[in-house]
Amino acid sequence: MFFASDNAGPAHPKVMDALVKANSGYALGYGADPIMAEVRQQIRDIFEAPEAAVYLVINGTSANALLLATMCQPWQTIFCTDVAHIHEDECNAPEFYTQAKLTLVPTTAGKMTADALRAKIKAEETRGVHGPQRGPVSVTQVTEKGTVYSLAEIKALTDIAREYGLPAHLDGARFANALVALDCTPAEMTWKAGIDAVSFGGTKNGAMGVEACVIFDPKLAWEFELRRKRGGHLLSKHRYLSAQMQAYLADGLWLDMARAANARCAQLAEGLRRHNVARMLCDPAANIIFFEMPRQDHQRMLAAGAVYYVMSGDPDQGDPDEMLTARLVTDWSMTADGVSQFLGLLHG
Amino acid sequence: MFFASDNAGPAHPKVMDALVKANSGYALGYGADPIMAEVRQQIRDIFEAPEAAVYLVINGTSANALLLATMCQPWQTIFCTDVAHIHEDECNAPEFYTQAKLTLVPTTAGKMTADALRAKIKAEETRGVHGPQRGPVSVTQVTEKGTVYSLAEIKALTDIAREYGLPAHLDGARFANALVALDCTPAEMTWKAGIDAVSFGGTKNGAMGVEACVIFDPKLAWEFELRRKRGGHLLSKHRYLSAQMQAYLADGLWLDMARAANARCAQLAEGLRRHNVARMLCDPAANIIFFEMPRQDHQRMLAAGAVYYVMSGDPDQGDPDEMLTARLVTDWSMTADGVSQFLGLLHG
Amino acid sequence: MFFASDNAGPAHPKVMDALVKANSGYALGYGADPIMAEVRQQIRDIFEAPEAAVYLVINGTSANALLLATMCQPWQTIFCTDVAHIHEDECNAPEFYTQAKLTLVPTTAGKMTADALRAKIKAEETRGVHGPQRGPVSVTQVTEKGTVYSLAEIKALTDIAREYGLPAHLDGARFANALVALDCTPAEMTWKAGIDAVSFGGTKNGAMGVEACVIFDPKLAWEFELRRKRGGHLLSKHRYLSAQMQAYLADGLWLDMARAANARCAQLAEGLRRHNVARMLCDPAANIIFFEMPRQDHQRMLAAGAVYYVMSGDPDQGDPDEMLTARLVTDWSMTADGVSQFLGLLHG
Amino acid sequence: MFFASDNAGPAHPKVMDALVKANSGYALGYGADPIMAEVRQQIRDIFEAPEAAVYLVINGTSANALLLATMCQPWQTIFCTDVAHIHEDECNAPEFYTQAKLTLVPTTAGKMTADALRAKIKAEETRGVHGPQRGPVSVTQVTEKGTVYSLAEIKALTDIAREYGLPAHLDGARFANALVALDCTPAEMTWKAGIDAVSFGGTKNGAMGVEACVIFDPKLAWEFELRRKRGGHLLSKHRYLSAQMQAYLADGLWLDMARAANARCAQLAEGLRRHNVARMLCDPAANIIFFEMPRQDHQRMLAAGAVYYVMSGDPDQGDPDEMLTARLVTDWSMTADGVSQFLGLLHG
């Protein structure tokens, strides 16, 4: 009953096996290992992008910050949602790497609409050099609220970016969960929808700690490499990143894990819908649920060993009937029985 | 016969076992995993520093850059050698994180002398706000040339730093190799010798990719934590860093590996001393040798499958008799037989 | 009829006379000129702050950026209004100097309320290292909308800052205009109201180009000096900044000029109130008016030679009856006759 | 007898007259003033560069830092001399603006030779992403030691830069003094000699505080404008910069002032050559002399009211016979009589 985060669960055994298997003999460092050559090809194939530049880093914060820095100038502003991970959860890493600022687009259920994005871009009229200049648009898929943009919604956002000459970034920390939810191809969810660069997550979906940075315009490749090194994000024993990603992608393991996580989430959602007081804040599309429930019910669940974050107040102190918002996140490793046990307690 | 780098060899099987063992069930992320609590205690014990702040990062560049940024102000200059890794091999990462500059102290055999350091510090008279202000002194142990400072030499450098009110940093990417070479304690090589913070390497000595940042003044801890997060260097699935370091330190594995690497290096040095034309540039004290040899001999060795870097010219092109400098690095995983094979070829 | 900006008018002749007078013989540079010693004392006297650190820079952007950088850490967020000059009009200079980010507090008539500020500070719960940390509160007085905070309003904002341990900055580009509007002392409007540092403007109120940075805690003085030099904002021939500020403050010239500017603004406001279609957006308290009027009326005024900015649309193109917002700014050099002429045309 | 610096003397009365004349009526700010349009044309004419981008800033530090930032990437290193103003006297401003580092080329008499530059550029082999990448070459003319590069010497340096694809910057804080020393045209000393951008000084040669940034490739213009604003270096009441530069350039005033300064320096040098113990460190070519003389002679001169910097030791304390190095700087405002008086004392 551990629903705190999809970065708290274990890596898939096949990923660990690949690490152990890679740990033999000598291999050139810094990305020149032979496994990386294979990974590059895997990702180009998966994205139907034979020219794409592909790099591996250890986590989503560095992937986002490095990609945005490569797409942005220090006098620009990056358009993202007011709940974006790059705004709320990275302790100014995007600002550190880009030297730019963020303009927050208001959201409904974690998503910005095309109209809201356009309004913010229009408002950022720079009056010559005085204001910040318009910079990249960053879209998070799966959103931080557990919703998923449709392909048409992504396209509508990148169309506006294109109209203003701005590049588009996809924060895909939960890329696989969105992909299986939409049942589309990686190309459809990215460059065919107008995305220029992707933070392609592995860590939250069964890897130990690896994300790919995929840049569709190879002209940016060398700058990215220099930024990665300068940020301290180029690993010497790089083969251990490569091996993780190789196993993650092999035989559709990444999609299987995302499907499993989403299925557990759907099971949770189904149970919550039947509950007489708990209420989901929006319809979960992937592996995250936000719901509200009286404090006393949270207390009961937490006391019974359920682990998850209560976001809007202290679960221990206060009016027992006050509705408190909480978040449930599922991952590949959860069992249907574990979810049933949680729902049983909830309904009990 | 792979002597290119100590970051090209495999991790020790015990480190991999620890990773696999850690990969079970849920664990809080971002350093709150239970293994990290144990690692913190291990390192405090090893350093006889019960108050030390201890953090893990993925590599030496980030360890150095984050520690120096925590010890430095943007208007200062960091004193290091003219062959320091932070100067030559980190693509401006120290400048990026610290916003400061580096003042290069000339070296003999990779070491700065106390007199050379003092001369540079004195010369950096700031004339009020005009020049850069004096900042930290950074000492590399094992040096980039394979030599090792004695405890008295370190103390002489930190005494000057202290005299000018400057903090002292130790780049210990090969900390263990130096420690066994000096046969002293970690405390003796660091805080007892005047060092304020240490980049404590694991990656080059049998880990997969982990370094500890050890700060003896716990008042700097919180700033370090914020800088690590802001640099994108805080891992969500942190347990996999912790597990590596735990296994690395357990039962003296780290010292055993360093002793093995140094022994192989001594074996190489002994063989080179007997060679009639090859000549070592300085006496190796740990696991690195710089030597020179005619181009044609390098060609012969490389053709026979030896792998190492020739630093001072193209081994393939040029006068066959020209002396070219090369580097040999040993690690824990090499066998005496492998070294004998190399020496046999060399002497053959 | 030139109401575009208070930085478009001339400097006061007494300021120019002081420059010419200062231009004689040799004077030490970089702030060591004898006039600066007098200016420091003038400002300490005026602010009743005998320990205050006082520095001169060329403009408001550098004053704000340097002060905020001295009060802030790179992992923090600065609380300011959503119309703040530091947010909208400085092309990321605050972000460049502080390396931090801005959190925008919503406004009414250019002002943030204590409740709005508190809500934003509370929302910026950092969850450990994950979010940006809370940083300085920056208050603009006169606001960008021409309103003026009462002393109690400033105090209410700095009380919240104090409660959270955050320093408070005053962007006083139009400090004098606010002061005469409130009819209070500089001490009352700053440190007695909880302000820690002030950008004390001169440029918009009759100087050629000079602002004082006044820091009430002298412990920050040296850091400020280093930041100023590192930003390229320390003038070698500093006496020409000092001379301006000396003349600006002598015999209450600065207050006389602010009173004149405010009086012209009041005259404009009185005329606008009598107008049958023009409508002021908020009651002007100092020397700025925002008002709306049909496009055709703007066209008529602009064609007649009035100069001012129409903010909300193109005055030349569109529905003649559409209401367009415009800004009028007065300065010390305007005459009552000039304003009457403008109002005559408006009513004509 | 004030030889401390050419930034300690007064501005030329014609410059002050121009300021006063410009101080009338309204003028658009931020560089849109009509005088700036004239200044741009003046400078394009003087440099025979009809396409050049021309901007004004307040001092040499900001001119250098902004130009270098526009010519450089954060992962590069800038090649300059080990006595360069950008290295020694700007408190990390170049590092702040460029985010890059400096590589110091050794000097003789303040100059780098082509061989020394080539050696440093070659040594900066980057080994892929590991080292800093090669960046701009910055040449100071007049050098910090008072010598002047010949046109052929400048060309030899920029030829090497061109060979490696690096841009070339000229720090011309004393541009006019060099120009009259070489008796050449501005075009010959800059773009015809391979220079891409110039910090064109006015402050040290009779202006109040103004430098032009001249960029021969207009494609960099917009980035420079954004960097200037973001650095807080765009003046609102810009006309007062423009007016200075206009008067400075009008009727060859700038060249007359430089000739006067150089003539006073030559007079000093002639007197020093006749002295029996004082010894010049290199032959002065413009308006700066470095010389050495026993401490007791310095004491005598300083006691008699001469003002200049003794660089290599405390003039007040120590062996009376110790030779101490000192610097003499002349400017436009000095009289031949004043210099004679100094020399009379010296020889007395």
Image (cartoon, coloured by chain):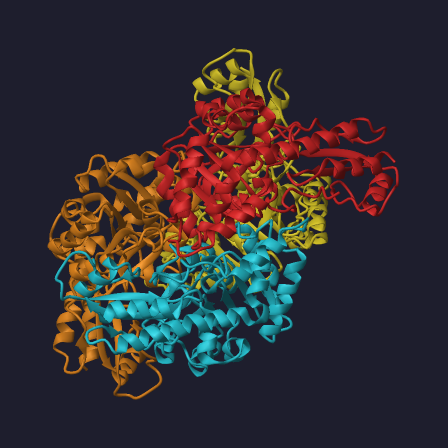
Chain colours: A cyan, B red, C orange, D yellow
Q: Quadrant of residue D48?
A: bottom right
Which residue is nearer to you in this view: A296 or D123?
Answer: A296
Q: Using the image, determine if residue B129 lies above or below residue B34.
A: above
**Residue occupying the point 88% across, 36% down:** B348
Does the image show residue A331?
Answer: yes
* Residue A238 percent across, percent down from the top left: 60, 53
* Residue D121 percent across, percent down from the top left: 68, 45
Q: Using the image, determine if residue C124 lies above or below residue B276.
A: below
Q: Is residue D114 left or right of residue B141?
A: right
Q: Using the image, determine if residue A245 lies above or below residue D4.
A: below
* Residue A289 percent across, percent down from the top left: 32, 70
**Residue occupying the point 26% across, 43% down:** C214
**Residue occupying the point 59% across, 42% down:** B206
Q: Is residue C14 left or right of residue B28?
A: left
Which residue is nearer to you in this view: D12 or C45?
Answer: C45
Which residue is nearer to you in this view: B34 or A311?
Answer: B34
* Residue B37 percent across, percent down from the top left: 39, 42
Q: Quadrant of residue B166?
A: top left
How many numbered marks have been drawn onto this rendered protein structure? 0
Does the image show residue D255?
Answer: no
Q: Is residue A113 left or right of residue C289?
A: right
The quarter of the picture where the C terminus of chain A appears is: bottom left
The quarter of the picture where the N terminus of chain A appears is: bottom left
Which residue is nearer to you in this view: C247 or B228?
Answer: B228
